[in-house]
Image: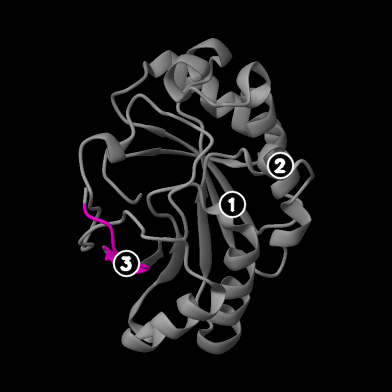
Amino acid sequence: MSKGMEILYKVHNGLYVNLTNRCPCACTFCLRQTRETVGESTSLWLEREPSAEEVIAAFDAWDMESFDELVFCGFGEPTEALPVLLETARYAKAHFGIPVRVNTNGLGNLIWGRDITPELEGAVDRVSISLNTPDPEAYLALVRPKFGAGSFEALLDFARRAAAHVPEVTLTTVETTISREEERRCRQICRELGVNYRIRAWEGGN
């Protein structure tokens, strides 16, 4: 494992922000178990977490107008570094007019012990939450969150609350990893929450 300070990296036509390697989950399928890179990165293992000032300074090396969106998603859960996320997201929107997405496990409220979704308003345009499965027991076995049995319901509650503050909230599963019937159940969950559902390809960074 090589560590550096690769804060920004490109995936498709998005610029991704690698804020932290901390995560409250130990997913059985996590990319970090087998690789150091995603997209056009070199190594997403950080020597230390960057400050908001460092992230903002890193923007200078990129043509920000060439990207479709700024995505907070690296080798960790971005809401672990919430203050830096919010400051840099607001800066990017104010200075570059770029849409901001956060890819998350949906456990930010458990991480911080409060409802953080109102803080996303005005700073974040899209939230993508990894649902993985419609079944709470299967979720625990797959994701292995440190918060235990309440994590699945906390994820759904986060999605519901986020929808009141963020224009677009989407729950995702990965194609071929669950059955068609399970995908149907995921769609129903999303309808009940008032959020979108997306089946995504198995691909790092998405």
Q: How far apart, in angstroms, are the residues tagged by discs 1 and 2? A: 9 Å
One can see residue 30 in this view? yes
Q: Identify residue for label 1.
A: 79
Residue 201, visible in the rendered structure: no
Tell me the amino acid under the disc marked 2: Asn
Point out the stretch of residues depicted in magenta. Answer: 2-11
Task: Assess disc 2: are there few (<14), some (14-19) or many (≥20) residues with their C-alpha within 10 Å of its C-alpha.
Answer: some
Amino acid found under the numbered disc labelled 1: Thr
Sequence-wise, which precedes: disc 3 or disc 1? 3
In percent of width and height, residue 73 lies at 43, 55
How far apart are labels 3 and 1 at the CA level? 18 Å
Q: Quadrant of the rendered structure where residue 26 is?
A: top left
SS class of the residue under badge 1? helix
SS for tag 3?
loop
Query: Residue at horizontal 32%, vertical 28%?
Result: 29
**In this image, 153 relative to 68: left or right?**
right
In the displayed structure, would residue 77 be above or below residue 199?
A: below
- Indicate the position of residue 102 as horizontal and vertical percent values: 52, 56
What residue is shown with label 2? 109
Main secondary-structure element of the magenta-colored stretch: loop
Q: Residues within 10 Å of mark 1 (few under 14, many from 20)?
A: many
Quadrant for residue 118, please give it: bottom right
Q: Does the magenta run of residues contain 148? A: no
- Looking at the image, which residue is at 40% across and 81% down? 58
For marks 3 and 2 on the same chain, the one whose residue lies earlier in the sequence: 3
